[in-house]
Image (spheres, helix red, strand yellow):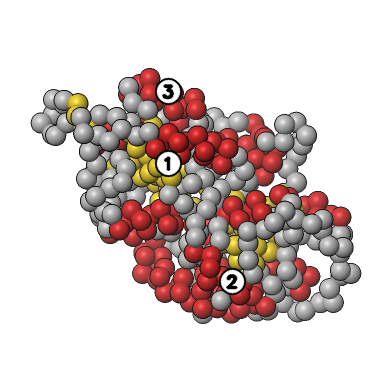
Amino acid sequence: MLPHHQTAFVPPTWRTPMRRAPSPPEARRSRTHDLTAVGAAARSRPQRPLGRLAAVGALVVAALLVACGDDTTATNDGNPPDATGDVQLLTYDAFALDDTAAAAFAKKSGRDIALLQQGDAGSMTARAVLSAGRPEGDVLFGVDNTSLTRALAAKLFEPLPKDILELVPQGYRVEGPGGDTVVAIDSGQVCVNADQAWFDERNLAVPTSLEDLTDARYRGLLVTQNAAASSPGLAFVLGTIAHFGEDGWQDYWKALKANGVRIAADWSDAYEAAYTVSGGDRPLVVSYGSSPPAEVFYSEGKRTRPQSSVIEATCVEQVEYAGVLAGTKRPEAGRQLVRFMLEDDFQRAIPLSNFVFPIRDVPVPEVFERFSVKSPDPLRLDPTDIATNRDRWTEEWRTITE
C-alpha cells in the first residue's frame, strides 16, 4: 500500500484533443528553453511572484556600498566586539526588502541592512555551504525545507538565543541537530498556476490534478523550472515524488516530457517570460499559491480579480528560514536582524513585498487574503527522506528530462 498522498501513476486514456486553438500573440523574447537545452539551465535567476524584482537594482547598489568592517564596536558580554557597518543579509535575487520595514530596523538598531543577492535560493545555499565558516555576509535568509538539512550538516549557522527561537510558532520550529540555529520566517506553497482567461477563451477546462498535466489536451502548455538549480522547480519534483511514490514518479516525468513540458532556468524565466499572463506562450506555470494577488496589486486598478487560478492538488509546502552565519564579524547585529524578521514590522510586510505567508499570526492585506490560495493538505515529504535522496532524485530527474 502506498503512503499518504501517493498513488501509482497510470497514464490517462488519451482522448481526442479539442480543436487546436489559435496561436497566442507573439510573446516577448523568451529566456526559457525546451528539454533539449535543459543542461544549459544551471544559471540562477529570480524565482518569486511579481514585484519582487522592482527593488533589486537599488538594493544591489546598496550591497556594493557595504562597509568593509575593519572597525569594531565595543560590547560588554565578553565576546569579541561586532564590526561596524551595515548588517549584511545574504539572500536570493528575487527577495524584496520592504522600505518601511528596513527603516524600522535602522531606527531600532542604528544599522542599515545591505542586501547581498546571489541568484536563486538553491545556488545561494550551495555557495554558502562552500564558504561555511568564512561567510560572505552576516545573516542568510532563503534556505528552504528542500535544502535545510544540507545547510545544517555544513554547520552554516551559529546557535540562536532561546527568546528568538520561541518567537516561531511551535509547528514551524526545527527539531534535531542544528535546529537551534535557524528560524522559519515565511511559508508558501509551490503550485501550478493556470491562465484562466486563456482556457476560457478556448472553452478548455483547466486541469485539476497532476495526472491531468500528462493529458494530450494539455500538450505543450506547462512550463516548470530546472530542479537542479531552482527552488520551486525542486519543490515541484518533490511534490510529484510525494504523490506518485518512489516507484511511480519517474514514469510520471517521462509522460510529462512526452507531453511537451518546458524546463525554464528559474522562476523568473518561467513566470515572467514563458507564462501567457506575462506575454509568453505557456498558460500553465509552476509558481506559488500566493502569486495571483500580485496580479491585482500591481495592476494599478486595472484588475479587480487575478487572471490566474491555482490548481490546489499540485501544491507543495515550502518554508523559508534565516540564521546568523557562523564566523560573521557582526554576530550581535545578525541576531538583532533575525529577531526583527520575526517581529510585526517585518512579518506584516511579507505578503505584499514577497507574496508568501508570514510565519507568525499577523494581519495580512485584504488583497492577499482574498486571492491567495493555501491548500489545507499540501504535498509533503519527510525532511529525512529529502536529505537522504535529494541528490539522487535530482540526477534521475535530469536524466529523464535531458
Question: In the rendered image of this protein, does residue 12 appear above or below residue 265?
Answer: below
Q: Residue at x 74, y 71 (%)?
A: 219
Position of residue 105 measured from the top left corner of the image (x, y, whole percent): 39, 26
The image's mark for residue 104 is 3
Q: What is the secondary structure assignment of the residue under circle 2?
A: helix
Query: Which residue was labeled with disc 2?
Result: 37
Q: Earlier in the sequence, mark 2 or mark 3?
A: 2
Check disc 2 and give the amino acid type.
Ala
Q: Residues within 10 Å of mark 3 (few under 14, many from 20)?
A: some
The span from disc 1 to disc 2 (Cα, nearest Å) is 35 Å
Q: Earlier in the sequence, mark 1 or mark 2?
A: 2
Q: Earlier in the sequence, mark 3 or mark 1?
A: 3
Q: Quadrant of residue 294?
A: top right
Q: What is the secondary structure assignment of the residue under circle 3?
A: helix
Check disc 3 and give the amino acid type.
Ala
- View extreme (right): residue: 19
322 vs 350, left or right, is left
Q: Quadrant of residue 367?
A: top right
Position of residue 295 measured from the top left corner of the image (x, y, whole percent): 69, 41
Query: Which residue was labeled with disc 1?
Result: 185
292 vs 57, left or right, is right
